[in-house]
Amino acid sequence: MNRFFLLLGLALLTSCLQKVDLEVEQIPHQLVVNCFFTEGEAFRVHVSRLAAYTDLSDRNIPNARVTISANGKSLGTLTYLEKGVYRNPAILPQPGKLYQLTVEVEGYPKATAQDSLPHPVFIDSVTYTPKAGKYDDGLDYNQFSVWFRDIPGKTWYSIVIIPYDIFSSDPVIAAEGMTGEDFVSWFAFSDTLFSNQFYGLKINVGDYYRDVDNCKILLTSGTYHYYQYLKRLLKHDSYSWEDPFKPYYPVPLYSNVKDGLGVFAGFRCRPYNLDISNPDSDE
């Protein structure tokens, strides 16, 4: 679980480095605020400033007032730790509450955002199939079928299989515009095609991970803001692998921060461990 959320955290911390086609004096004077939160873990908020690509000075802001409220009632402020990170170990998110984040820094517009924890969705079982198919070039790939039951109401997800990079031809993933055999670190998808049903999501991995005996599958339920940010980030990052001679169409990162940039989003996840040295064993 740590690998994915470490990658996600690094993406959050570097999201303000996106190159923009603006003159330096045209860069908006805004805060960049990022926080993914989940049950049982204290809110951890990163605060920086929007800066031009050529501005190499420190973007982190150490003097912000960061406040968390729940259902309109203030829960307290977060303390600055280091490198733009604020935290208060006494303030932990709980299900059923709407949280609001407020960030105030002198000289900047007040940045606010709100979100809640989604309902959890747990993996029921996983089927691992070695040499499930072949690439176009004839090489083998292996497949995980991840079975889970969608819950009533609109639900959004992400999936990661550690330590693999993954690809998929599953119709649920294809519906998100992700097709072909390009490897990625995660997929983000909605329950549009399997709402309130028991579903087996098919995820493929290369057959060259021969020294891997155990893997960890992270099926995460997230809010709409969580889903939109991850989906947009995946499309944004995919341009780094595009043909350099093709026209470049930048994908702006998703933001739900009012009068600022960034994301404030809740998620729930319970890791599922699988011993693939014996495909019939799971946990």
Image (cartoon, rainbow, N blue to C red):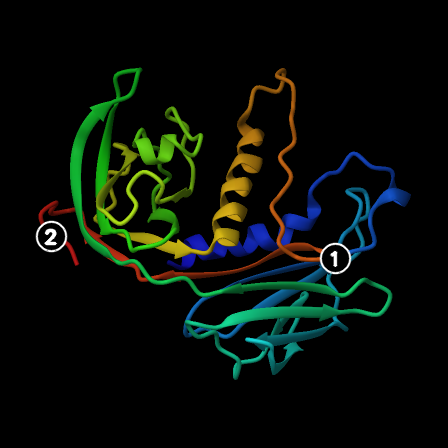
The residue that mark 1 highlights is 259
Which mark is on residue 168? none
Q: Is residue 270 left or right of residue 128?
A: right
Kindly identify the amino acid type of the residue bearing the numbered disc 1: Asp
Q: Nearer the viewer, residue 33 or 150?
A: 150
Can you identify the residue that label 2 sits on? 281
The quarter of the image holding the C terminus is bottom left
Q: Residues within 10 Å of mark 2 (few under 14, many from 20)?
A: few
Tell me where residue 253 appears, x and y as whole percent: 62, 43
Q: Amino acid at mark 2?
A: Ser
Q: Nearer the viewer, residue 278 or 112?
A: 112
Q: Earlier in the sequence, mark 1 or mark 2?
A: 1
Give the residue drawn at x 22%, y 33%.
142
Q: Is residue 270 above or below residue 241?
A: below
Q: Quadrant of residue 232?
A: top right
Element class at badge 2: loop
Q: Is residue 71 left or right of residue 204?
A: right
Instruction: For marks 1 and 2, give the one nearer the viewer.
Output: 1
Q: Residue at x 28, y 51 (%)?
A: 150
